[in-house]
Image (tube, grey):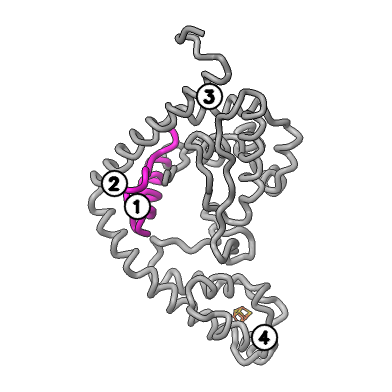
Amino acid sequence: MYICIVDWHALTAEYNDTGVLRDYVFQAAVDILAVGLDPNTCAIFVQSEVKEHAELHLIFSMLVTVATLTRLPTYQEKKEELESYGFLGYPVLQAADICLYNAHKVPVGKDQEKHIWLANDLAKRFNRIYGETFVLPEALFTEVPLILGSDRRKMSKSLNNDITVSATEKETEEKIRSFFTDEKKIRKGDPGNPDMCPVYMLHRVYTPDADEEIAPPCRTGELGCVDCKTRLSANLNAELAPLRQKRDELIGNPDYVWDVLRNGSDIARARAQRVMDKVRDNMKTSYRKRP
Ligand code: SF4
């Protein structure tokens, strides 16, 4: 498995404050290791350490129209805030991130489905023009493919509507208390619709038998939102406790974390270079080789 910390993508929002990126990269690596991804079986690396991402991005950008990119929902949602070419071309760089490793499955949330479609389309288009080169990637969803944030928008660090592994138990409880619920359920006794509620989405991940323990009493009104959130906080904090402990240990050992990223980048680069050699051969642009 290749786990890429996408610092170039972060530039779409942080282009004028790049001093924060080093810490973002470090914190992302700590989270990845704390949740249990093993650097002995996964290449965990930083995107900008593998320059081939930029090369394939440029090649892919020739195979997609501006109209296709402007129609993508993520562009439509944020186009007023982020007007740069980098933001418009973000999904093309994402396609390069995926195809550079010939990934066949990409674990994503439902909101990223269109981007995986674009990566698949670009791989197909390249293969059709230049010959068989890329595996066609597909999205890989979990049983709960969409988790919404506290304000019912996509859960995102930049929207501050997220729950982070690094938050304390108290901060997590406070954040869960702030979550929107089914707006028609005002007080205990009112029937609710858990399918419209971001709290229930998290229960489906963190509460065993949520479909029996939470959904039916929510629908009848027997379960109030305050109790429901308290139960979620308890389950979520119990699950995150060992991850937070591991996180603290990793923060105290930064040399180990940077070593993991260095090794991961070397492994990823070697793989990416093999794929790019094939890309250049098939495009007939390997000028140092005899035809
Ligand atoms: S009871 Fe729980 S699932 Fe139902 S609306 Fe309230 S918070 Fe959401």
Q: Earlier in the sequence, mark 4 or mark 3?
A: 4
Q: Is residue 33 magenta?
A: yes
Q: Is mark 4 within 8 Å of ligand 1?
A: yes
Is label 2 in a helix, a strand or a loop? helix
Is label 1 in a helix, a strand or a loop? helix
CA gap, disc 4 and disc 3:
55 Å
Q: Amino acid at mark 3?
A: Val
Q: Is mark 2 within 8 Å of ligand 1?
A: no
Image x and y of residue 60, in percent: 61, 29
> From which residue to which does the magenta span run?
21-49
Q: Amino acid at mark 2?
A: Val
Q: Which residue bears the numbered disc 2?
A: 257
Q: Which residue bears the numbered disc 4?
A: 219
CA gap, disc 2 and disc 3:
32 Å
Crowding near the residue tagged with mark 1, few <14, some 14–19, many ≥20 C-alpha atoms within 10 Å: many
Is label 3 in a helix, a strand or a loop? helix
Q: Which residue bears the numbered disc 3?
A: 279
Q: Amino acid at mark 1?
A: Val
**Rendered residue at 67%/90% (across/down):** 220
**Rendered residue at 63%/40% (across/down):** 120
Q: Earlier in the sequence, mark 2 or mark 3?
A: 2
Left or right relative to 224: residue 36:
left
Q: Is mark 1 within 8 Å of ligand 1?
A: no
**Rendered residue at 54%/61% (across/down):** 142
Q: Earlier in the sequence, mark 3 or mark 1?
A: 1
Image x and y of residue 54, in percent: 51, 28
Q: Amino acid at mark 4?
A: Arg
Image x and y of residue 136, in percent: 59, 40
Q: Nearer the viewer, residue 286 or 9?
A: 286
Q: Are marks 2 and 1 in contact (CB under 8 Å)?
A: yes
Q: Is residue 113 magenta?
A: no
